[in-house]
Amino acid sequence: MALDSTIVQRIRERLATNQPLRCQVPGGGVLNVDRQLPFLCVFRRPRNEIDASMAKLVRGEGAYLVGRGDRSGRRNTRELVQLTVAELAPHFGAFLIVELWAAAEASADMAPHFTLAAPARTPQAMLETLQAELGRMRVQRRRARVTVERLPPVAPGFSPLLTPAQAQAHNVFVIGIEVAPIFRDPTTGTVFPLVLRRLHRGLSLALRRCFYEFAVSATTHRPDHFHTLGRRAMVKAVWDADAALARIDQTVDFLLLVTPTNAEAAWRRFRRDHFAKAPAFRYRSLPFDPAKLKRSLFAIPIERVEDPMLARLFGDERQDLERRLSMLVDRNTPSFLYGSLQVYGPVDDALLDLARDILQRLPPHRSGSDIRGTVGAAKFAEAARAEIARCTARCPQFRARVEIRADLTGLMVSRDCLYVGASLQVSARRVEALIQHEIGVHIATYCNGADQPFAQLRHGLTGYEELQEGLAVFAEYLVGGFTGPRLRLLAARVVAARMVTEGSDFLSIFHALRDEGQFDSRTAYLVTMRVTRGGGFTKDAVYLRGLVSLLKHLADGGEIEPLYVGKIAEQHMAFVRELQWRRVLRSPLFIPSYLTDEAGRERLAAARTGLHVCDLVGIRPNLTRTTIRKAPPS
């Protein structure tokens, strides 16, 4: 089936006016051009192609064409290439076509292998960049091999996309990439999706750097960064997957569902029993069927997401949600702890050493030593609402609420709501610090995430808790409310989390904290409750680990404002920067005042000089400790 004049006219108009173009090719195939770009990726599917895997390797680029191998498909593909070149090349003074095809077979060791078919006139700097970037790729711990051959850049069995005269007229360069099909079994043809995904991501990054080198060396285009040549317009599958994941995430109020509802009553009974009998905790009933949610979760067609980076993010989020759903099913069983270790990671020896060192160096807090007194739930809630009002005055999109609840102890943020336990009693000097911890970080990043196009940024990308809690604790320092007792408490949580992973029960942990750690009975109970709830919960180790990681990030010259873009992990910073370069994500809508006022700026500047966590409370650190390892991503 030939291209009709209506399709041709539509393509010309959208390319000429720099509008996104996505055109289904008659008879099969698709032309997708995000905007005016100086390149086009092409894959022509042979008649005997046994699967659509190779086509996925070009999908996700800013400009690509997938064509069919039958007679009409070949004709349409050549016509579309010629049409695209004629419209776009004059804008840039030169144009690049990259054609991909599969090698006949993969090497025996199934290592990634690319053969670059590059004519003699290929720009050398661009070719060297592509060769180097592909050579850095590793798939299943095998480094890629790259071969450059001076061959015609034409897929086997096909004719050239352009005649020499057409290429010369528009200053078009063509390069071919033959890809070893390591993503499928050479005997059965079975596709390995995870290998294909890794290959796609690595190839996409290499191509983008190649496009950048071509643009700056051979065209009039001057992109600010190679990521600016990435895709901006997203297909419907992206928004569908994001919305579906968000619906499930919003259904599962995970932290609330693993928090005991009878913590206060259990404390009173525990005290009456002279701390000799472990309390029994009760939990909220699940307002959903986990099996049905899992069914919905794995019905989300993430494989339709063309962008390899977003497909990975969505896939990681699906896995994280599945693990949390399994944890909810496993409450009050040994399996809950195993799920917690998958989600939050273990307490490594270096973090444990740091926590023990803090407990040894900092004197225990004596009750009654705070001359400013304490603040109860009602007063704290009033102060929190006043802070929300100030934030909303600065940024009308900042929306949050405060709720006092009798079935909670302490403080908890769920989405845009700050829950205050009815029995809360906090030191008056700690009120501002805790408000900035909860509102100035947890709610601020929720509101900033809600301003972004992807819902995952408000609900939280996989593993976001460590950076979130590190930021939140650091906010306490920036407002001058991070104290020795607070650091001691964070260290105690680490020790308790390690104890629970080693098999210690409630009473053992409680008495260790009270008798050896010299914490008062109430504090020891609350710390122990937090780490033993559900069957063993290691989340509390992320506060100290996150603070250490954040201080290192700042000492290494890292920025802090981009960390407020939403609920992200440190491992996502490269992705966030990439999406910002591609103009998919915006800068944070709301920046807390403690990052801009004079006192906060001075403390932030001090942290950039390379502070240790102990420096934050004025004690000398033990610098012989080993480096704390990051928790593995779940």
Image (cartoon, helix red, strand yellow):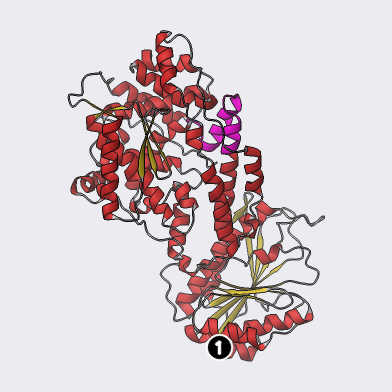
Q: Main secondary structure of the magenta part?
A: helix
Camera-nearest residue between 337 and 382? 382
Image-quadrant location for residue 352: top left
Residue 202 seen anywhere in this rendered image of the structure: no
* In the image, residue 335 lies in the stretch drawn in magenta: yes
Q: Mark 1 = which residue?
A: 170
Camera-nearest residue between 422 and 217? 422
What x and y, as percent, mark residue 297?
62, 47
Q: Residue at x 64, y 88 (%)?
A: 164
**Residue 272 to residue 353: above or below:** above
Image quadrant where one finds the N terminus: bottom right
Camera-nearest residue between 179 and 83? 83
Q: Residue at x 33, y 47 (%)?
A: 554
**Residue 530 to residue 53: above or below:** above
Disc 1 residue type? His
Q: Secondary structure at mark 1?
A: loop
Q: Label 1: few (<14), some or many (≥20) within 10 Å?
A: some
* In the image, residue 371 lies in the stretch drawn in magenta: no
Residue 50 seen anywhere in this rendered image of the structure: yes
Total number of numbered labels? 1
Q: In this image, 38 relative to 524: left or right? A: right
Q: In this image, 175 relative to 599: left or right? A: right
What x and y, as percent, mark residue 358?
33, 26
What x and y, as percent, mark residue 600?
23, 46
What x and y, as percent, mark residue 58?
62, 67
What is the span of residues highlighted in magenta in the rendered image?
324-347
**Residue 181 to residue 32: above or below:** above
Image quadrant where one finds the C terminus: top right
